[in-house]
Image (cartoon, rainbow, N blue to C red):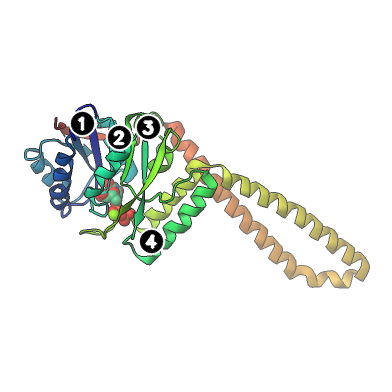
Amino acid sequence: MVDKNNTLSVVIPMYNEEVNIRPLFDRLFPVLDGLGMPYEVVCINDGSKDRTLEILEDELGRRPGLVVINLARNFGQHAAVMAGFSQSKGDWIITMDADLQNPPEEIPNIVEQFRKGHDLIGTIRKGRKDTFFRKFASRVTNRIVAKISGIELHDFGCMLRGYSRQVVEGILENPEYRTFIPALATFFAKSPVEITVGHEERAAGESKYSLIKLFSLQLDLMTGFSMWPLRILFAVGTFMAISSLAGAALIIMLRLYYGPGWAAQGVFTLFAVLFFVIGCQFFALGLLGEYIGRIFQAVRKRPTFILGWVRGQGKQ
Ligand code: UDP
Ligand code: MG
C-alpha cells in the first residue's frame, strides 16, 4: 500500500552505540522502505564518547532519509528523545532504542494502529529478554506507578512506541526538565492502544543504565506524575502524632499508678521512640527535598537539551 498522505518519523536516542548503528540501519531502512510512505530516521547523538557520531556522519551521505542531531553533551535518554521530537516532521512518530532490543520489524504493526486512527500506541514486551532483577524491578514499578499516577500502562519501560503529531506537540509544550515520555504522553492522547511486541537481548555493548540511574528514573516517574507520596507522608505524620500523644498519656497514667520508681525503667523506650521519630523526620525531609528540587528546576526553566547541530533530511 502506498501512503503519501502521512509521513513517519523514527526517533532513536544513541549513547555509545557504535557497534549497534550499522546492524540497526541494515534492518530498519528496508522495513521503512517497505512501508511505501515518506519517512525520516532521526538519530540523536546524546554526547557519546565512542565513535557513534563519526559513524552517523558517515551514514548521512549513504542513507537518504537519515537526520542526525548532535547534542552538546549527554542529557539522558528522555531528553534526547525530546530533542528528536523537536526536530521531527512526521505526522506519526515512533521512538525506539538503538540496541536492537526493539525489533524494527514491529514498526509496520505500529503504523497499522496509526492507520486505524489511534494516536498513542504503547507496547508490551513479549518474552522480555532482560535479567531477572530488571524484570522484577520493572514489574513492581509498573504496578506502583499505575496505582499512584492513575495511568493505565502495562509496560512503561518499552520505548518502542508510537505518538501522533498532536501528542508530540503536547509533550513539547510541556518541557519539564526531567520527564518520562511514555507516561507524559498519556495526558495528550485521545485514543491510546497497546499492542504486544517482541523483545530481544541487547545486540552489543552494555546497558547505559546503572542501578543508580534506574532508581533516579523511577523517582522521576513517581514524583513527576503524582502528589501521592506527599499525601502518604501527611497521613503517616498524622497517625504518628496521634499515637505518640496516646503513648504519652499512657505513660503518665502508669507513672501515677505505679509511682516514680517505675518511670526510670522507661528511659530506653523513650530513646527508641525518639530515634524512630527522628528517622521519620529525615524521611519526610528527603521527600520534601525531592519536590522542592523539582520546583527549583522548573523555576529555573533550564532547557531539557541543548542542540549542537542537525543535518540530513527525510525521504519522500
Ligand atoms: N541512551 C541515551 N542516553 C543515555 C542513556 C541511554 O540516549 O544517557 C539511549 C541508548 O543509546 C539506547 C536507549 O537510550 O538507545 C536505551 O538505553 P539502554 O539500552 O542502555 O537501556 P536499557 O535497555 O538497559 O533499559
Ligand atoms: Mg536496551
Q: Amino acid at mark 1?
A: Asp
Q: Earlier in the sequence, mark 1 or mark 2?
A: 1
Q: Pointer 4: residues within 10 angstroms few (<14), some, or many (20+)?
A: few
The relative height of residue 43 versus residue 257 in the rendered view (above or below) is: above
The residue positioned 25% from the left and 40% from the top of the image is 11
Q: Amino acid at mark 2?
A: Arg
Query: Mark 3, mark 2: which one is toward the viewer?
Result: 2
Single out the mark in the foreground, 1 or 4.
Answer: 1
Label 4 to label 3: alpha-carbon separation? 29 Å
Q: CA distance from mark 1 to mark 2?
A: 10 Å
- Left or right: 219 as drawn, with respect to 40: right
Q: Residue 62's quadrant in the figure?
A: top left
User: First in sequence: mark 1 or mark 4?
Assistant: 1
Q: Amino acid at mark 3?
A: Val
Tell me the residue that label 4 is attached to: 134
Cα distance between the residues tagged 1 and 4: 39 Å
- For the residue carrying disc 3, how many other residues have a C-alpha within 10 Å: few (<14), some (14-19), or many (20+)? many
Whole-percent x and y of residue 241? 74, 52
- Tell us which disc is closer to us: 4 or 2: 2
Given residues 89 and 226, the one toward you in this image is: 89
Taking the spot 33% from the left edge, 62% from the top edge, the residue there is: 130
Residue at numbered disc 3:
167
Name which of mark 4 and mark 3 comes first in the sequence. 4
* Mark 1 residue element: loop
Q: Which residue is mark 2?
A: 115
Residue 274 locus on image (x, y percent) = 69, 61
Q: CA distance from mark 4 to mark 2?
A: 34 Å
Alpha-carbon span between mark 3 and mark 2 = 16 Å
In the rendered structure, which amino acid carries the disc numbered 4? Arg
Mark linked to residue 275: none
